């Protein structure tokens, strides 16, 4: 009888651990509301490379983004970004094409929510250099 009670306790413990783990994983990997992702999240970016000030404007929707930037020597270009939404931060990687014989750019960075409606970020673009970002969520 005692062995049967101990076996039941072990089974209940295993079921409880499995349920807790499953609920935790479900909370982490559940996608956010699609309606919130449809509204673009714009930002402005200011940075520098080789002593030149660079700037850009961008927007993100459905974990993709587009950034229009101006780099050194008046080079202008567009970057396409892919965001990876994690619980607290959103890292991104991107590739772009710039004028003035600058060619192809690669970029990466991270954006973090500062408040419910404001986010900040930091990134690097191989043509525009390091930059800071300030954006709005609607």
Image (tube, rainbow, N blue to C red):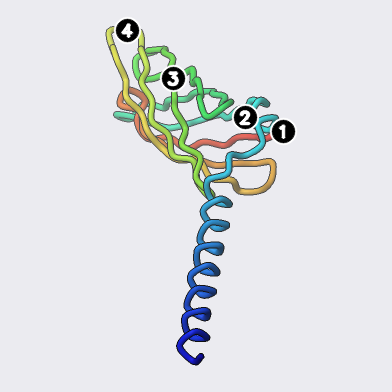
Q: Gap in Å between the C-alphas at discs 3 and 1?
A: 22 Å
Q: Are marks 4 and 1 in contact (CB under 8 Å)?
A: no
The one nearer the camera, 83 or 41, is 83
In the picture of the structure, the residue carrying the numbered disc 1 is 138
Please tell me whether mark 4 sits on a helix, a strand or a loop.
loop
Residue 41 is tagged as 2
x%, y% of residue 113?
59, 46
Residue under the image location 41 percent in, 37 percent down: 109
x%, y% of residue 104?
29, 15
Residue 80 is tagged as 3
Residue under the image location 51 percent in, 75 percent down: 13
In the picture of the structure, the residue carrying the numbered disc 4 is 100
Residue under the image location 61 percent in, 27 percent down: 42
- Circle nearer the viewer, 4 or 1: 1
Q: Are marks 3 and 4 in contact (CB under 8 Å)?
A: no
Q: Indicate the quadrant containing the C terminus: top left, top right, bottom left or bottom right.
A: top right
x%, y% of residue 24?
54, 58
Q: Earlier in the sequence, mark 2 or mark 3?
A: 2
Is residue 122 visible to the viewer in this orientation of the structure? no
Q: Gap in Å between the C-alphas at discs 3 and 4?
A: 19 Å
The one nearer the camera, 30 or 88, is 30
Q: Earlier in the sequence, mark 2 or mark 1?
A: 2
Q: Earlier in the sequence, mark 3 or mark 4?
A: 3
The one nearer the camera, 1 or 14, is 1
């Amino acid at each position: 009888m005692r062995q049967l009670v101990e076996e039941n306790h072990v089974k209940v413990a295993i079921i409880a651990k499995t349920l807790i783990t499953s609920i935790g994983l479900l909370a982490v990997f559940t996608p956010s509301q699609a309606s919130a992702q449809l509204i673009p999240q714009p930002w402005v970016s200011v940075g520098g490379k080789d002593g030149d000030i660079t700037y850009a404007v961008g927007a993100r929707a459905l974990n993709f983004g587009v950034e229009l930037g101006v780099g050194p020597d008046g080079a202008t270009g567009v970057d396409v970004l892919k965001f990876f939404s994690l619980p607290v931060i959103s890292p991104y990687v991107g590739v772009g094409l710039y004028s003035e014989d600058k060619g192809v750019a690669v970029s990466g960075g991270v954006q973090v929510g500062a408040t419910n409606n404001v986010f900040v970020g930091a990134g690097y673009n191989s043509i525009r250099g390091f930059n800071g970002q300030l954006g709005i969520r609607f």
